[in-house]
Amino acid sequence: MVDPLTVEEWIRVHADPVGTIETVHERPWATVLRVPLAGGVAWFKACAPVQAFEPRLTAELYARWPDRVSEVLGYDEERAWLLLADAGRPVGAFGNPPEARLAALPLYAELQHGEAAHAQEHLAHGVLDLRLTTLPARYDELLQLDLPLEWDGIRRLRDFAPRFTKLCDELAAYDVPETIQHDDLHHANLYEHGGCVRVLDWGDASISHPFASLVVTFRFLEERTKLAPGDPWFARLRDAYLEPWGRDLGDAFALAVRVGTFARPIAYMRQRVALPSEERPFFDTDFSTVLRRAVAQTVA
């Protein structure tokens, strides 16, 4: 919980509210408030410890990439508070069309490429470490949990552990720099305004293989937009994303998506452990889906 009077006082240092500041949602990982302004709205976010790195990370990204992340009006690293300008409408409001990704993905890839130089800095300030060298041990940690998954799925994940380690080594051999990876790049976190598409909500971000970003993007194009596996849009979006990397990395991309599909439930561990026990059944609804998608990747 955040004290409303303290928060409002802090907000007024960075903006001029013209009406009542309202709570939009309270989640175990963050509380979001709507701040009415004379020219529109701003958004205040108080992050829980599990994603306390987000305000500083967002501010750093905005300082270097102001045209592709939301404008930061103010942040407090110690209290994990963040105040953002309005970024428009999520592309999900338009039905999550794949066309919205064509312009956004190359810009996002350029951001990732540039942020590789700051990867160690981000790690030092709490961004989750999911680099390839860490994944086999974290995979073993995942298998120690009481997973919301059928026994056959758990068995298949356990049997796959040695192969997963080899896949991580194979992917590392492509020598693509590990960098910031949003890890929640779907229709609700891409916003459009005035022809500019921005990436919001960096609370799930990690330092990991950059190409794994499209694991979530492709999942929601399948589930929400109903693109069939093998739809030409997947190859088109892959090519648009890879273009800024400057060399033929199609094989690396396919391998990164496979490895990233396992890394996704590994990333969930941090949030799940931080949840009160009564919150876990709801969280496990999506967690089980992510686990089943990983199980599907155990088949060559």
Image: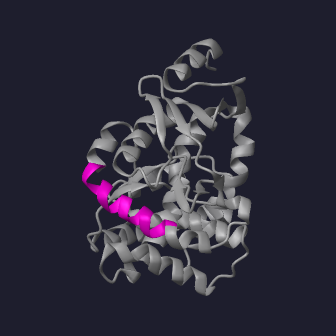
Q: Is residue 89 above or below residue 49?
A: below
Quarter assignment of residue 152: bottom right
Report the residue that reaches farthest toward the top: 5
Residue 25's spot in the image, x, y percent? 71, 34
Residue 272's spot in the image, x, y percent? 60, 41
Task: Verify whether residue 107 appears in magenta.
Answer: yes
Q: Is residue 12 above or below residue 150?
A: above
Quarter assignment of residue 229: bottom right
**Quadrant of the rendering where the N terminus is positioned:** top right
> Relative to the observer, which residue lies in front, 261 or 192?
192
- Residue at image x 51%, y 35%? 50
- Residue at image x 48%, y 63%? 213
- Residue at image x 72%, y 64%? 94
> Relative to the observer, which residue lies in front, 82 or 298?
82
Q: Which residues are magenta?
A: 104-118
Residue 260's spot in the image, x, y percent? 48, 64
In the rendered structure, the answer to whether residue 151 lies left or right of residue 233 reads right
Q: Main secondary structure of the magenta part?
A: helix
Q: Is residue 59 visible?
A: yes
Task: Verify whether residue 38 appears in magenta.
Answer: no
Q: Is residue 150 visible?
A: no
In the rendered structure, the answer to whether residue 198 lies left or right of residue 206 reads right
In the rendered structure, the answer to whether residue 81 lies left or right of residue 92 reads left
